Amino acid sequence: MTAPRHGRRIAAAIGTLSIAALTVSACSATGDQAEGGGSDDPIVIGISLPLTGDFSEPGKGVERGYEAWRDIVNENGGLLGRQVELKILDDQSNADRVVSDYESLIAQDGVDLVFGPFSTRLVVPSARVAQEYGMLFVEPAGAAEEVFTQGFDNLFYAAPAIANDHYNNLADYLLALPDDQRPATAAVAAMDDPFAQGTAYGLRDKLEEAGVEILVDEVYPPNTTDFSTIAAKIAQSDADIVIGGTQYQDAVNLIIALQQLNYQPELAAFSTAPTNPEFAAAIGGATEGILAPTGYSPKSQFPSNIEFVEKYTEVHGNPPSEDEANAYTTGQVVAAAVEAVGCAEQGECQQELIDWLRDNSVETVVGELSWDETGKPTGAHLIQQWIDGEILIVLPEDVKEAEFLYPKPTW
């Protein structure tokens, strides 16, 4: 960051947006007319999401989060006094489709702003389209390291940490254990997906560097449903711990296959899936001790999170999960820039929004976010564990809700 942060932080809590909306737009052509539309015209945000295909489960969660953000923003007066509309297309979990979707949204539909899709595999090509058009690109789910080595100058990841750093708190805990308690061996299975592999390999590499032997290291295609062969390799290895670089359904299928073979690891960590509301039912309730990194807890007391959880739960009957929260955070980050700069249209406004985020931090439902020059967030993830039928924060120590169970109980 090149500019000082003192006094420049802005809270993106949605409850304050109606006050900020009274600010006169710095991009307005007249007192009543903003660039690209009248003061009563809605701000249209273009989004492509994987609502079908391999990433449809988390994609629908992101959609729910975006819609919750829109509804709460509009209830509080909109952005710059204008209502917000979302134009959402289904990219079918296809990288070619996501490119054509953002081309259409920006060039043909003329949306004012864009939000990112789900999955690193879709974020990279869509961010490239947004950069070609000079558009700000805040995204909720492109956490793999490769996202931040493409040279994007318009991209910001709306979460506390990238994939390779998700398990840092867990690695630190395990490696600080006495030698006779530390795991000696590990088995790894990861989807052929940059995010899934990033989460698993970040932990794998840290443990391996400290002397933990990797007995199994398998990669499988995203559409894999039969995990009998991989589960057999893991079970036969009798590795102390198992690490799954997973999305949702693949994690469920792998865990069930491991349970059927009566493999009992001392630690089981699976990215993303254990935080899904359907996870416990999907694996027959045998969740005790399963771990996952998360950038979000619905119990956190950040002011905007309290409102988000309350209103989301009213609509859906359950609190939001991480996918919904990261989408909501994306909205908060963009809203903070829009309100601070005073515009929300294609053109020079977009560079002003980008520049503002480069030099400022934003308060969100996942805490305060700031970014380096690549758009990489500068925070860390929490570690959650299933304990007595609940998924609770166990690491780091200063924010834990329960004691870390290690070794894990049998499943």
Image (cartoon, rainbow, N blue to C red):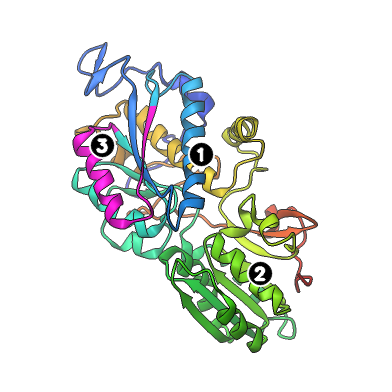
Rounded to the nearest angstrom, the CA distance separating label 1 from label 2 is 28 Å
Q: Quadrant of residue 53?
A: bottom left
Q: Check disc 3 and give the amino acid type.
A: Gln
Q: Which residue is mark 3?
A: 350
Vertical comparison of 381 with 45: above or below: below
Query: Viewed as shown, does residue 46 lie left or right of 381?
Result: left
Q: Which residue is mark 2?
A: 256
Q: Is residue 252 magenta?
A: no
Q: Is residue 95 magenta?
A: yes
- Check if mark 1's residue and mark 2's residue have beta carbons within 8 Å: no
User: Does any portion of residue 113 appear in the rendered image?
Assistant: yes
Instruction: Return the x and y of residue 18 as percentages of the image width and height.
Output: 47, 19
Query: Element type at marker 2?
Result: helix
Instruction: Return the x and y of residue 75 as percentages of the image width and height.
Output: 51, 20
Q: Residues within 10 Å of mark 1 (few under 14, many from 20)?
A: many
Q: Check disc 2 and give the amino acid type.
A: Ile
Vertical comparison of 27 with 337: above or below: above
Q: Which residue is mark 1?
A: 64
Q: Residue at x 61, y 52 (%)?
A: 276
Query: Element type at marker 3?
Result: helix
Which label lies toward us, 3 or 1?
1
Vertical comparison of 216 with 74: above or below: below
Which label lies toward us, 1 or 2?
2
Q: Residue at x 55, y 73 (%)?
A: 226
Query: Viewed as shown, does residue 96 lie left or right of 132?
Result: right
Residue bounds of the magenta highlight:
85-112
N-terminal label among 3 and 1: 1
